[in-house]
Amino acid sequence: MAKQALFSLSLLLVLLFHSTTTLGQPAPAPKLPAVAPAGPAPPGPPDVAKILQKIGGFTILIRLLKSTGVSDQLRGQLNDSNIRFTLFAANDNAFASLKAGTLNSLNNEEKVRLVQFHILPTYYTLQNFQTVSNPLRTQAGDNKPGDYPLNVTSMGNQVNISTGLVNATVSGTLYSNFQLAIYQVDKVLLPLDLFVSKVPSPAPALAPAPAIIKPKPKKTPIAASPKTSTTTTATPTVVVDSGAESLATHGILVPIGVAVFIAALYL
């Protein structure tokens, strides 16, 4: 009986120890739902420099786009889907055909203008150029004559561009989406404002200055050299009319004749 009571007590102690050990252990953490793998990031705005670099042959234009900051400016503006551009891209061969020193003659601000002159602030398809109103405004400035005007004409599949200094042709489409169109041109577009010296506007006409009358120099009288004066007595000239002389002669002879005639009668 004592052995049975001892066995029961031992069993009770074992069960109590096991329960205490189990309750002291932390409960297992709940399992989290599986995370789905991330999909591809949405495409950013078009990067003009990367597009041209991928195509190849536009090293000089890419360098100008980056050094002037125009590439970053375009990318930033294209973040807004309502902003659209058209770029005329001249390849390295077109730049090589420029007169030596053309690019080096420009300062940093003028290089920015040159690059911006190749960009239109509107998206154009090749078909749109058939109905555009010239001159077109570029990113470089206004479309006033002598500033940065660009004339684009289209005949069939050929698109021609005139800057007033250069006539170029669109030779192909390099890139096009709803925001950006890039067309290759066979010449670098040189604007008049940068490469033709402007004629300065005439100065306003001034009123003529009053004429200055200079006083005439006074003449100094020249002293006459002393001379010996000679007194000359002028002899009056008497002019006798021949008729008067004849009358006088007859006036003397008539009384004489009368006197002789009277004397003859008394004799």
Image (cartoon, rainbow, N blue to C red):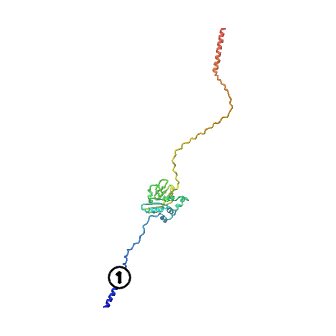
| Nearest to the observer: residue 83 or residue 166 | 83
| Nearest to the observer: residue 26 or residue 147 | 26
Say which residue appears at 35% left-offset and 82% top-offset: 20
Above/below status of 33 relative to 248:
below
Which residue sits furthest front?
A: 2
- Choose top left, top right, bottom left or bottom right for residue 242: top right
Judging by the rendered image, the residue that carries numbered circle 1 is 20
| Nearest to the observer: residue 108 or residue 183 | 108
Instruction: Specify the amino acid type for callout 1.
Output: Thr
Residue 119 is situated, as x and y percent measured from the top left of the image, at: 47, 59
Callout 1 secondary element: helix
Residue 53 is situated, as x and y percent measured from the top left of the image, at: 49, 65
Above/below status of 253 relative to 105:
above
Q: How many marks?
A: 1
Say which residue appears at 33% left-offset and 87% top-offset: 9
- Choose top left, top right, bottom left or bottom right for residue 217: top right
Residue 146 is situated, as x and y percent measured from the top left of the image, at: 49, 53
| Nearest to the observer: residue 200 or residue 13 | 13
Task: Categorize mark 1 by other alpha carbons within 10 Å: few (<14), some (14-19), many (20+).
Answer: few
Residue 143 is situated, as x and y percent measured from the top left of the image, at: 47, 55
Q: Quadrant of the C terminus?
A: top right
